[in-house]
Structures are given as C-alpha cells and as structure tokens.
Image (cartoon, rainbow, N blue to C red):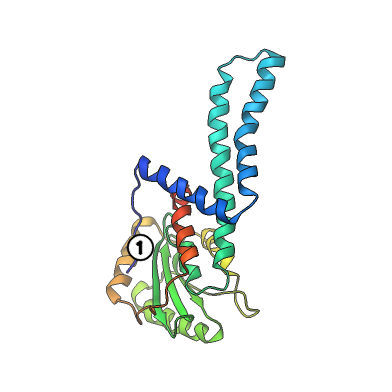
C-alpha cells in the first residue's frame, strides 16, 4: 500500500532529530567533530567581533540561529551518507531511500520475482517512476509493469530505472533520491495524487516478498525523516 506523507508535531520532530543524531554517531566517527565545529564556529566568530570590533552582544542571537542551521545541515549530510552506505547491496534499499520524500507517493513491491528482484513505484510531479532491483531479469519485469500501468495513466510519463551496483544497472542505489528529484515536472500535485489513487486501485501485481527491508536502512530512513520533511 502506498505510503502517504504524515504531519509531524514539533515534539515528534525533535524526537526524530535525536534519533538521527544517535543513529549517525554510532556509524560515523567524523560526525561529532564536524557537528561540534558547525555549532561552535558561529559563536567563535561573534565573540571575536564583540571583543575586537565592539559589536553588540545581540549578535549572539544571530549566532544561535546560524549554529542551529549549520548543525542541522551537517546532521542531514552525514545521516544521508550513512544511510546510503548502509543500503548498498541490500534488498529493498531503493524503496527505503525514497520513502518519505516530500511530494512523492511510494508503493513498495508492486511486482516481484523473489526477495531480491522487485519493482517499486513512485508517483510525483514528474509522473510515474518504476524502480527495479535485482539485476537483468528485473528489467523485463519493469517493462511488464510499465505496460500494465500505461493503460491507466494515459499520456503521463512513466520512467523505468534498474537500480544497483552492477555494470548493467542504470545507476547506484545511493543515487536514487537525487535522480528522482532531478526529473522534470510534467504534472501538478493534484494530478499526481489522482494518478496515485488510480494506481492503488489496481492493486499490487505480486505481493512483496516477506524478506524484510534491512533493519539498519529502515532505522536510518526513520532517523532521516525529520530532515527530509523539513525541506
């Protein structure tokens, strides 16, 4: 079933950021030093300006906001790097990395041959994107799924990509989110939502295998959600 965007409260956003900090710190030795530098540097600069250039102490308020922003930027970058690294070579990773992106409705396992060969569907302003995982056999499955849904979406563009680390794949799983965001905007949000509902009504071609999306990627996806939804 498609994943829909959910609104987060301020409290839940703080909890998710805390989860992201814990998740990233456990896997990235550079995270804490970079995070500390990002937060402290604005205060160091303002202190120098106050002491040597006689700037007003009110500048510390600006330093606080800059420090918070810099800290979130570093957190987002390092969490993204860790999540991408954890996902490489694991089944279901393409879905794990795009689930939760603002403006996209994502449905996992709309077609599958095995626990490692499957197709995920994403619907957004670009149209419909089918992402296959699992090697050459999945490319045929992508074509079959495209043909199946083309009868429903009409002239709406349908993109197909084979994702993975093999030479015959279109691009690495670590590039999935970036590639999706770079696609041209072909329809508006209202049409995208309508198409997503029509495709959901078709049902899933083959149930997604019971093999779980890797736990670490699943955790990272949840940890990263606050940053993704804040964009």
| Residue at point 49%, 50% (across, down) | 20
Residue 204: horizontal and vertical position, in percent? 33, 77
> Which residue occupies the foreground of this view, 52 or 140?
52
Residue 163 drawn at (x, y percent): 55, 73
**Looking at the figure, which quarter contains the N terminus?**
bottom left
Could you say which quadrant of the image residue 147 lies in?
A: bottom left
Taking 22 as reference, is 78 left or right?
right
Residue farthest toward the front in the current orientation of the protein? 26
- Taking the spot 42% from the left edge, 42% from the top edge, the residue there is 14
Question: Quick one: which residue is furthest to the right in this view?
Answer: 52
Return the residue nearer the eye: 39 or 184.
39
Q: Answer with the quarter of the image where residue 110 lies.
A: bottom left
Residue 12: quadrant of the picture = top left
In the figure, 148 relative to 96: above or below? below
Position of 222 relative to 58 (above/below): below
Q: Residue at (62%, 32%) from the top-left corner? A: 40
Which residue position holds label 1? 3
């Amino acid at each position: 079933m498609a994943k829909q965007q959910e609104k987060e409260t301020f409290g839940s956003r703080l909890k998710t950021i805390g989860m992201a900090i814990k998740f990233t710190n456990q896997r990235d030795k550079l995270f804490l030093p970079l995070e500390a530098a990002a937060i402290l540097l604005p205060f160091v600069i303002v202190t120098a300006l106050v002491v040597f250039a006689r700037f007003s102490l009110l500048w510390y308020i600006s330093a606080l906001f800059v420090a918070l922003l810099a800290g979130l930027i570093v957190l987002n970058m390092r969490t993204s790097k860790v999540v991408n690294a954890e996902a490489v070579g694991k089944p279901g990773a393409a879905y794990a990395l795009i689930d939760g992106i603002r403006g996209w409705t994502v449905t996992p396992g709309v077609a599958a041959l095995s626990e490692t060969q499957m197709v995920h569907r994403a619907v957004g302003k670009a149209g419909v994107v089918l992402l296959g995982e699992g090697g050459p056999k999945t490319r045929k499955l992508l074509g079959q799924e495209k043909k199946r849904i083309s009868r429903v979406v009409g002239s709406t563009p349908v993109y197909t990509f084979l994702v993975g680390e093999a030479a015959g794949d279109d691009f690495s799983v670590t590039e999935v989110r970036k590639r999706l965001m770079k696609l041209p905007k072909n329809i508006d949000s209202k049409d995208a939502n309508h198409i997503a509902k029509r495709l959901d009504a078709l049902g899933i071609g083959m149930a997604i295998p019971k093999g779980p999306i890797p736990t670490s990627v699943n955790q990272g996806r949840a940890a990263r959600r606050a940053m993704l939804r804040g964009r």
